[in-house]
Image (spheres, rainbow, N blue to C red):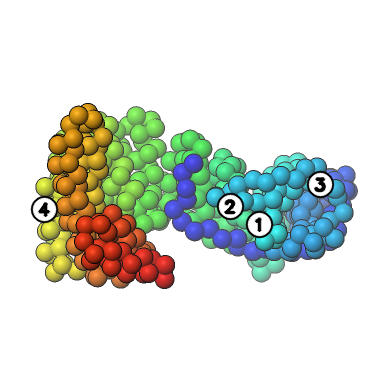
Amino acid sequence: MKKLVFALALVCSMQLAYAQKPDAEMQKGVDKALEATQDAKKAGKAATWIKLAEAYMKAYANPTSNITPGIDKNTFTMMNKEAPISVSTVEIEGQAFEKMQLSHVDVYFNAAGVVTIVDVTKPSVPGDLLGEAAKAYSKAFELGAKAKDVAPKMKEIADDYYNDAFVAYQLGNMAKASDLFKGCAEVSAMAPSEVVNDEAAYYSAFTALNSQNYERAESMLNQCLERGFYQDGNVYANLSTCALAKADTLAAKNYLASGLTAFPDNAAILTNLINLYLQTKEDPAKIVELLDEAKKAMPDNPSLFYVEGNIYAGIKDYEKANAAYDKGLEIADGKYDMCWYGKAVVVLKECDDIIEEMNALDVREWKKYDELAAKLTQKYIDAIEPFEKCYEVSEIPEVKAAVADSLKRLNFQLRNVDPKYQEAYEKWNAIVGAE
């Protein structure tokens, strides 16, 4: 499953409001409020629609009314009198959780025994209760309800959509997450709030893409594009994926070309562009032509040469890759960390090629094996300097951490070659441990 490349956090926490009530009571409340909207006289009053919205929201909140994320298991057990249907251990995003299945919800406790995720599996009243509540509040506003009263309620609904979408994403239900993020975006845009929530629209597209709903993904991404919301270039990269799903390579190229010009550092655009040209078996030089256009607009941007170096490294043209990285370093007076990083990675790619060649040798070709082993050792040594330069000039903690780890590993490999590498290993091991 493709991972989200952005951080998500709950907008608000569900609060303990009242004891959970029977579904029939919730349905009765909704039916009574709906019946009032069918009365010609009552239907023209804002209060009638507000009562309907409140009935929907009460039904929506009912399954989780006695569950508050953040409480410990003992407190939860005292508050919740329902015997669980089942209890099991599950893994979510690499972490172990205890899953307690109840009649209406699944409750997930983290390793510390704290309620972390609550997933409603059976609503008290069927349907999209948040959407129906939003429509009712919107109708009330049309009939004269004050914006100061309606807008906070609409925001609450949008927040609930967002929270539920995040839960669905955590549990790997991409299609459901996409529906809910879309609901968040749509409710945010409704009167009287009329807030454009491009972030929710993008997340809806991203999760739709992961559930192979390319039509929705393309629609939502184009909305983002029209409003100038690019998510650091990822909108272009994802639109290219949608285009390729329809076998429209020309559209994919155009999206990537536009994205590359505006966001030359975007890894997803670069990866998609390289894969596209490899897939279509076209000359990789055509990718560089796109870069050349960007260079005309930004001749002093070293990141464009970093991208060019990555392109050549991807097709194992290491000489051209290093030439591009060197040009980037020349422009940046040797202080662009990513070009140093690229040069180091090229050496590691050469190491991988040597290892592959060694593994392919016949057992009797021991002389050739020894020659390659000596060559491999030298390559490990060659990788140290660019990594050290990268660490020296970089101001990005994540880059420094990755480089320190690489230097630790390289010096460990070389510890028997010379005592200085053992000392260097201990130095970088301490740095990695401190970080």
Looking at the picture, tell me which residue is in the foreground, 354 or 370: 370
Query: Which structural element holds mark 3?
Result: loop
User: What's the distance in space between the residues labelled 1 and 4, CA to CA?
Assistant: 50 Å
User: What's the distance in space between the residues labelled 1 and 2, CA to CA?
Assistant: 8 Å
The residue indicated by pointer 4 is: 323
Report the amino acid beneath label 2.
Answer: Gln
Looking at the picture, tell me which residue is in the foreground, 192 or 154: 154
Looking at the picture, tell me which residue is in the foreground, 38 or 287: 287
- Mark 4, other Cα within 10 Å: few <14 / some 14–19 / many ≥20: some
Mark 3 touches mark 2? (CB < 8 Å): no
The residue indicated by pointer 3 is: 84
The residue indicated by pointer 1 is: 110
Report the amino acid beneath label 1.
Answer: Asn
User: What's the distance in space between the residues labelled 3 and 4, CA to CA?
Assistant: 64 Å
Among the two numbered marks 1 and 4 on one chain, the one whose residue lies closer to the N terminus: 1
Query: Which structural element holds mark 4?
Result: helix
Among the two numbered marks 1 and 2 on one chain, the one whose residue lies closer to the N terminus: 2
The residue indicated by pointer 2 is: 95
Relative to 221, 70 lies left or right: right
User: What's the distance in space between the residues labelled 2 and 4, CA to CA?
Assistant: 43 Å
Image: 268 above or below 250: below
Report the amino acid beneath label 3.
Answer: Pro
Mark 3 touches mark 4? (CB < 8 Å): no
